[in-house]
Amino acid sequence: MATLAKEAADAAKAEGEAPWRRLVNDFCRSPLAVFGLVVFLIVVLVAVFASQISPQNPYDLNQLDIMDSRQPPGERSADGYVFWLGSDGQGRDMLSAIFYGLRISLAVGVSSAVIALALGTTIGLMAAYFGGRVDTLLMRAVDIKLSFPSILIALIIVAVLGSGVWKIVLALVVVQWALYARTVRGSALVERRKEYVEAARCLALSHSRIVFRHILPNCLPPLIVVGTVQVANSIALEATLSFLGIGLPITEPSLGLLIANGFEYMLSGQYWISVFPGVALLITIVSINLVGDQLRDILNPRLQK
């Protein structure tokens, strides 16, 4: 009886909490998710303040010395500071290069995910709300997009447009928007049949107000989960394109490009040029996925205890 009373009290307390506070409390119950969030925040801070905390600007030719090329971790440069993670073939400090590469990788991943989310959400809401021919036309476009591998579409777009940050972002937006549209449409179809939407129509509210102020807020939980996962996917896909040599130019380095630069030295034993950027990429993606997994467990009622 005492256990049942305690559970009832906890449930009543949870119902009285603000939604954001309940979300925070549920999120903090997973040590792995909290660890992932802390790691991701550290990665973001390192990327934002890369120019302030990096030992050198790895892309300033005045700070590079060819005599410092391919130094192993722990060696000192000609100027006296330590290459904690070694240097690459151009004499760039790998720690500094990773800090700068994180900035580009995060910027590309987050910006492409946000733009794709906005585009896909709008298309999915229109398809679900208007239905009929609009739904059929938009969903057939989504089906065509989802029938092709993402990497193939990205390769074609980048090959046509050329390298550059915003060209990579555009390619990733084209790759991702259909997933958001499909997700939102499924949730919006359920909400469209509910009484509050019918009441809003009886009040002669505009279509845009009904869609964006009434239906969209109730579709946000799955969007948050998909958006979190897609940020990690965008970073991984951009790294793949850069590794293949058709992504970002050398003047705008990302983690994928840093991995590619050291690939030719792997067989000669100079592993650090590729391995350390690869570890940084792995840590970034895993931390985002840990956060996304916990948000999925919280926001999906089927996964709740």
Image (tube, rainbow, N blue to C red):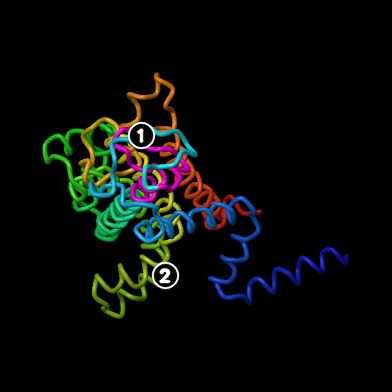
- Tell me the SS state at disc 2: helix
Which quarter of the image is occupied by the N terminus? bottom right
Query: Of the numbered discs in the image, which one, if any, rests on residue 24?
Result: none
Q: Which amino acid is tagged 2? A: Glu
- Local crowd at mark 1 within 10 Å, few (<14), some, or many (≥20)? many
Judging by the rendered image, the residue that carries numbered circle 2 is 195
Return the residue nearer the eye: 126 or 57: 57
Give the residue at mark 1: 259
Q: Is residue 94 magenta?
A: yes
Q: Secondary structure at mark 1?
A: helix
Residue range (magenta)? 80-102
Q: Is residue 221 above or below residue 18?
A: above
Identified at 24% across, 51% down, the residue is 135
Task: Check if residue 253 falls in the magenta segment.
Answer: no
Q: Residue drawn 59% across and 53% down?
A: 35
Q: Is residue 171 left or right of residue 7?
A: left
Asked which quadrant contains residue 76, the reply is top left
| Cβ–Cβ under 8 Å for marks 1 and 2 | no
Residue 93 horizontal/vertical position (percent): 37, 43
